């Protein structure tokens, strides 16, 4: 093989690898349980912009209208116990369809494990948009 062919083959193969990696990331982002894990872990890492992107706009507006107004910081601090999450374990995911072409929602039960060894179970409700799952409610069953 000529050096030109080897370089072209390397470029094509690297492009295929990049496309496969993007597909895998999108596939993991397309599940309701993946959305829940990513939202908690982003908030836990202090990346509130990324965590907030997983929230449904109406839910986001509800949270930001609570004191202190304009931020989700205290909301995420409550659910991550001020960034002390070590792991998010999905216990159950149930997807329901009213009309498969129009509307889907999901319920994800997850165990949130913290640095002090304690854990809490949360139930997260999500709606499906054409591109992704969005969180519409998070509640602790003990509340």
Image (cartoon, rainbow, N blue to C red):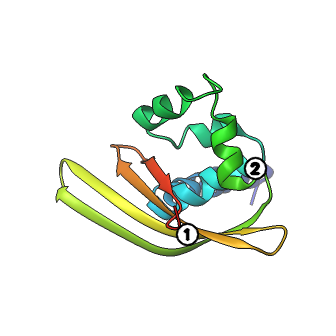
Report the residue that reaches farthest toward the front: 143
Number of labels in the image equals 2
For residue 96, what is the image quadrant? bottom left
Where residue 30 sits: x, y (%)? 46, 56
Q: Which residue is mark 2?
A: 7
* Quadrant, the N terminus: bottom right
Placement of 48 over or under 69, stated as above or below: below
Q: Which residue is mark 1?
A: 110
Q: Residue at x 80, y 58 (%)?
A: 84
Q: Point out the tag, 1 or 2, that comes first from the N-terminus.
A: 2
Report the residue that reaches farthest toward the right: 116
Q: Is residue 124 left or right of residue 100?
A: right
- 13 or 50: which is nearer to us? 50
Work out whether residue 11 can be spotted: no
Placement of 62 over or under 31, stated as above or below: above
Q: Is residue 142 left or right of residue 2?
A: left
Q: Residues within 10 Å of mark 2 (few under 14, many from 20)?
A: few
- 83 or 99: which is nearer to us? 83
Label 1 to label 2, Cα distance in Å?
Answer: 47 Å
Tag of residue 88: none
Placement of 111 over or under 130, stated as above or below: below
Q: Residue at x 61, y 27 (%)?
A: 67
Where residue 37 sits: x, y (%)? 60, 60
Q: Residue at x 64, y 28 (%)?
A: 71
């Amino acid at each position: 093989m000529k050096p030109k062919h080897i370089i072209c083959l390397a470029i094509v193969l690297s492009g295929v690898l990049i496309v496969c990696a993007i597909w895998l990331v999108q596939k993991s982002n397309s599940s309701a349980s993946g959305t829940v894990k990513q939202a908690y872990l982003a908030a836990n890492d202090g990346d509130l912009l990324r965590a907030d992107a997983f929230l449904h706009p109406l839910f986001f507006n509800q949270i930001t209208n609570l004191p202190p107004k304009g931020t989700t910081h205290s909301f995420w601090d409550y659910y991550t116990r001020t960034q002390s999450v070590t792991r998010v374990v999905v216990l159950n995911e149930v997807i329901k369809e009213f009309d498969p072409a129009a509307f889907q929602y999901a319920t994800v039960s997850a165990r949130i494990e913290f640095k002090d060894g304690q854990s809490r179970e949360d139930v997260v409700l999500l709606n499906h948009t054409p591109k992704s799952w969005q969180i519409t409610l998070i509640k602790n069953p003990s509340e």
